[in-house]
Amino acid sequence: MWNLKKLFVSTLLFIAIDAMYLYSSKKTFEDQIVKVQRVIMQMRIEGAVLCYLVLVFGINYFIIQPKNSVFDAFVLGVVIYAVYETTNYATLKKWSESMVVIDSLWGGILFALTTYLTYEIVR
């Protein structure tokens, strides 16, 4: 049985932390999308919601609920984000190497920080 408090706290933390990162790096992402698509980025809210549901499920299923380590969370985050980034790099001619590295590392940081803070808040 899942700890619903951990699920709730980790969901709030995940979204809040990622929102801060995305807000602070908005121009980088916008520039990359314009470079690839030749039009400004337009978010599909339903896609973003679905993405967050999948990511929050993943971090809870593989890390938080079974009480795995913060390092394991970092590795899982890097792997998930690197799959997305390396797929973009493989299929989109103008996708940058720096975006692959930065966003893949961000995935690890986001997962590790969410896990650490969830463990600290919900003991």
Image (cartoon, rainbow, N blue to C red):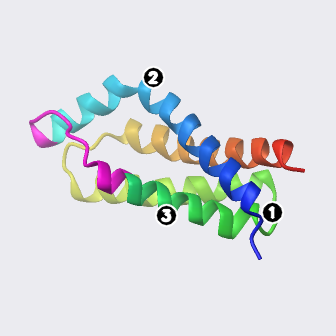
Who is closer to the viewer here, 72 or 7?
7
Is 117 drawn above or below residue 88 in the view shown?
A: above
Is 86 drawn above or below residue 96 in the view shown?
A: below
Label placed on residue 24: 2
Who is closer to the viewer here, 94 or 29?
29
In this rendering, position of residue 95 left or right of residue 79? left
Q: Which residue is mark 1?
A: 68
Q: Which residues are magenta?
A: 37-48
For the point 80% across and 63% down, which residue is it? 68
Looking at the image, which residue sits at the far right?
123
Looking at the image, which residue sits at the far bottom?
1
In magenta stretch: residue 43:
yes
User: Where is residue 95, by image quadrant?
Assistant: top left
| Mark 1: few/some/many CA within 10 Å (<14, 14-19, 20+) | some
**Disc 2, SS:** helix
In magenta stretch: residue 21:
no
In primary-sequence order, the first of circles 1 and 2 is: 2
- How far apart are the alpha carbons under marks 1 and 2? 29 Å
Disc 2 marks a residue whose amino acid type is: Ser
Q: Position of residue 80 (x, y in %)?
A: 51, 59
**Disc 1, SS:** loop
